[in-house]
Amino acid sequence: MALKFISAEEAASLVKDNDNVGFSGFTHAGCPKVVPVEIARSAEEEHAKGNPFKIGIFTGASTGDSIDGALSRAHAVKFRTPYQTNKDMRAALNRGEFDFFDLHLSQLAQEIRYGFLGKINVAIIEACDVSEKGEIVPTTGVGITPTICRLADIVIVELNKKVPTKLRGIHDIYELQDPPKRREIPIFEVQNRIGLDYVKVNPDKIFVVETEKDGEGDGFAPIDEVTARIGNNVADFFVAEMKAGRIPAHFLPIQSGVGNIANAVLGSMGSNPYIPRFEIYTEVIQDAVIDMMQQGNVSFASGCSLTVSNEMLHKFYDDLPFFKNKLVLRPSEISNNPGVARRLGIIALNTAIEVDIFGSVNSTHVNGTQMMNGIGGSGDFTRNSYLSIFLTPSTAKNGAISCIVPKVTHEDHNEHSVKIVVSEYGVADLRGKGPRKRAEEIINKCAHPDYRPLLHEYLNLGVKGHIPQDLYACFAFHHALAETGSMMNTDFSKYQKP
């Protein structure tokens, strides 16, 4: 059957008000860039006529501005899940314009299959190749692509001529069976491949839009003194763990969250002469990993997306034969699968908005109310890792905010899952410690020196119990910030029990 080629405008007309739309990609990588903008334009036209137009949005993770930015500015969002990083989308969801379901990334594809979240009407996929047999080769991000392609009534393929067709072979597309027929995922080593190098779709429901668009990757902020010190602290901790025999000499696979702190940690690991070559089993493969592959510090990387700058992406395309032997891209329910993470013994590295002195972590909400991005994949890996590590600067806003607080205002990862906390000041090892000893470890090793007296004062308020948490004073830091502009002005005497 011949492929059906249409324009972006014609493709957008296939999406109707109240539809649920699944998009390919994971971060900006692999996301469609033309049809979503046309959908946003159509929404604005309908709104100008007084007609409703909103869609539900399923994605692998965050997206580029062509999806989240364009659709949120057009007020065309009915709901959004599972994760976002766009400033316009963030502002709209915090205003309550639509529902945002903050989900663990490994769970979304199966929750769609289970029917928990409604029907998928349209899937919109970026591809570097598509055949008349319905074989779709994704570009640089996979996400939930296999599931939404299979379940959608219509599949719109943005065939991006900027991405070489020789990318085929880098993907490993595998979709889980649903219970009670689910079997083990046969990944026993990072480099194992278990699926196809394309997504198989009924060709009758495919429409193709030809595009020629560069990626939307801007790269990350440069490494500064604080992030460099965090990176060095992590690398030194790993060396000490290897010497103690708690990390094997051949090392273990690394999962690394997205951002400049993660890049700094990987860079410090690569430059440390006592850390051997290691493997990556993660969701997001960043610039640092590509550099480390070429330098020989990373032997193999498995991920869900190439979340790299445009400059690095072209470098990758120019040396595809080299990278095809060292890298694989999988769907998010495989790249983030908790069972695989536990089997492989992954060391999980993720960032925190705030950490409390007893070891609980807030990854998602500023002051407990304002969504930042979402939990993403951090929970997929944290609870199931060989070693869970959270990274944070000790302060924010030029010292007005302590990232180490008496109690987190929103709890994404509790003290049962968090093993190690690292700031630019040091490493707090929480393993084998009760609540008070954990608190002393975090305060003395990770908190900014200016905040340590206040944190010790809180810990010594005289509250009895297994966790000496004062329910009257636990948010005193946040009250002081709201009232005076700085947590340094905290006065615990204002919160004494009556």
Image: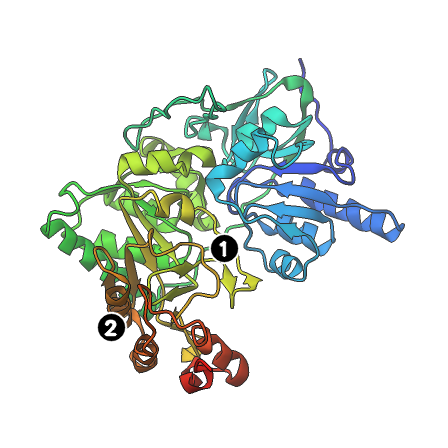
Q: Residue at x 57, y 29 (%)?
A: 113
Does residue 160 appear in the picture of this structure?
no
**Amino acid type indicated by mark 2:** Asn
Q: Which residue is mark 2?
A: 444
**Amino acid type indicated by mark 1:** Asp
Q: Looking at the picture, how far across and down is residue 110, in whole percent?
A: 52, 32
Against 282, is 168 above or below? above
User: Quick one: which residue is furthest to the front in this view?
Assistant: 498
N-terminal-most mark, 1 or 2: 1
Against 469, is 456 above or below? below
Q: Looking at the picture, how far across and down is residue 52, in whole percent?
A: 83, 47
Judging depth in this view, the residue of 132 and 369 nearest the camera is 369
Q: Quadrant of residue 385?
A: top left
Does residue 241 appear in the picture of this structure?
yes
Q: Horizontal placement of 489 versus 89: left or right?
A: left
Q: Residue at x 67, y 32 (%)?
A: 119
Q: Residue at x 16, y 40 (%)?
A: 250
Judging depth in this view, the residue of 489 and 461 nearest the camera is 461
Secondary structure of residue under mark 1: loop
Q: Looking at the picture, how far across and down is residue 142, in whole percent?
A: 50, 35
Q: Horizontal placement of 123 versus 326: left or right?
A: right
Residue 218 tag number: 1
